[in-house]
Image: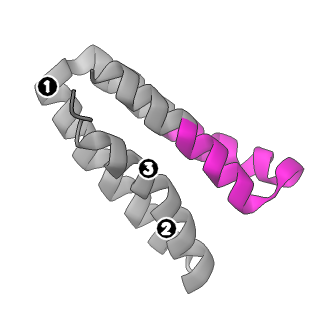
């Protein structure tokens, strides 16, 4: 079974958003990357899985972003991004099967 197209977009949104903010020095640029990936994915989830699943996945995506900040204080920035990306992408894969 093929992986839903939103799985890599979610992963790239989290990792790309962090990388864009970190390496550009512009947090808002990271926010644009995160928001663009989240908006595209949410639109697709609504179309393919319905609003309830879309809302749950968007909540997971945003919680991953929010949770990465306190987690980074404990394990470091990149390890935190890796953990929350795995959680968000895994939840997306499971919900879009």
Residue placed at 46% from the left, 73% from the top? 29
Q: Which residue is mark 3?
A: 11
Q: Nearer the viewer, mark 1 or mark 2?
A: 1
Residue at the bottom extreme? 24
Where residue 35 appears, as percent x and y from the top left, is 37, 54
Q: In the image, which disc is placed on residue 48?
A: 1
Total numbered labels: 3
Residue placed at 28% from the left, 24% from the top? 96
Q: Which residue is mark 2?
A: 30
| Range covered by the magenta-colored residues | 61-86
Where residue 97 appears, as percent x and y from the top left, is 27, 21
- In the picture, measured across the screen, residue 85 lies left or right of residue 42, that is right
| Location of residue 32 by image quarter | bottom left
Residue at the top extreme? 52
Q: Earlier in the sequence, mark 3 or mark 2?
A: 3
Mark pair 3, 2: CA separation: 14 Å
């Amino acid at each position: 079974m093929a992986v839903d197209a939103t799985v890599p977009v979610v992963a790239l949104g989290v990792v790309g958003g962090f990388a864009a903010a970190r390496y550009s020095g512009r947090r808002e640029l990271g926010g644009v990357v995160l928001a663009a990936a989240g908006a595209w994915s949410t639109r697709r989830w609504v179309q393919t899985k319905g609003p309830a699943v879309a809302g749950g996945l968007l909540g997971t995506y945003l919680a991953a972003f929010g949770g990465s900040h306190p987690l980074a204080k404990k394990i470091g920035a990149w390890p935190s991004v890796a953990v929350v990306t795995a959680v968000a992408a895994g939840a997306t894969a499971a919900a879009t099967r």
